[in-house]
Each structure stands twice: as C-alpha cells, then as structure tokens.
Amino acid sequence: MNNVVVWFDIPVKDLKRAIAFYSKVLGIKMEPPMEMGPDKMAFFPYEQGAVSGMLIESKDHTPSTKGTLVYLNGGEDLSIPLKRINAAGGKVIKDKMSIGQYGFMATFEDTEGNLVALHSPK
C-alpha cells in the first residue's frame, strides 16, 4: 500500500466559481468540467499513480466546515497560495504555522463553505 488516501471529492455549490477560486489560489489549471448524470465535476491536475481529487456539484454532497479536512499541496512555500485566498473570495481561518519536522500548514474556508488545509515544506 503506497498511500492510505487515493482520491478526494470537495463538494461545491457553484462549480464555475469553485474552479476559479482553486485555480487562482493554487496557480493551477483544472481539467475541463464534465457531467455524469445530474452531477458536475472538475478534476485537479494529477499524475498517474499520484493522489488527487475533484470538485463536485451534486445534490448528494454538501460543503461543510465540519468533518474531514483535506490537505492540498501548497507548493514549496505556503505563503504564496495563502496570499491569494482572500482576493479569490475565500477566508484564511488559521494562518501559516509550523508543524515541526513535517513543514507548515494553514486552513481556509473556500468560496463554497468548505474548510480546507494547505501544506508545504516551507
């Protein structure tokens, strides 16, 4: 077993808005949105065999600040994406803090009402 986590879904209310938010904060290009039945989704970039996930707009998924906390890759220096959160419509909840030998982390609330974390070595 390489990774305990293999995939994650982040529920959203407005897929277009969420794509714009995460693209700006993480400095990424999300895969084009697609639909499966009534659900709409957009995938984070990923490499074969790596852990990744998607944004999903669905009546079966509800954004929340309670429950499981997903940590996204904040790049080499967490300060960079952290500076983009408020301008993109989100809110920093816990500013950058050391987690010892494991690097740094911070939490934010996205435009959809989810509590999400960022992690980086610096």
Image: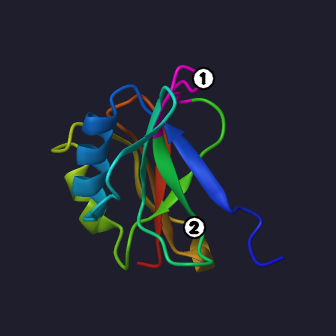
Q: Residue at x 27, y 63 (%)?
A: 29
Mark 2 lies on a secondary structure that is: loop
- Above-or-below relation of 82 to 16: below
Residue 8 falls within the magenta-colored stretch: no
Task: Give, as a three-letter code, the residue at label 1.
Answer: Asp
Looking at numbered disc 2 in the image, what kind of residue is underneath it? Answer: Ile
Q: Main secondary structure of the magenta part?
A: loop
Residue 90 visible in image: no
Reply above or below: 14 against 69.
Answer: above
Q: Is residue 23 depicted above or below 57 in this figure?
A: below
- Whole-percent x and y of residue 28? 28, 65
What residue does disc 2 label? Answer: 99
Q: Percent position (x, y) of residue 38?
A: 49, 26
Queried whether the magenta region covers residue 59, the answer comes back as yes
According to the picture, the residue beneath numbered tag 1 turns out to be 60
Screen quadrant of the C terminus: bottom left
* Quarter of the picture holding the N terminus: bottom right
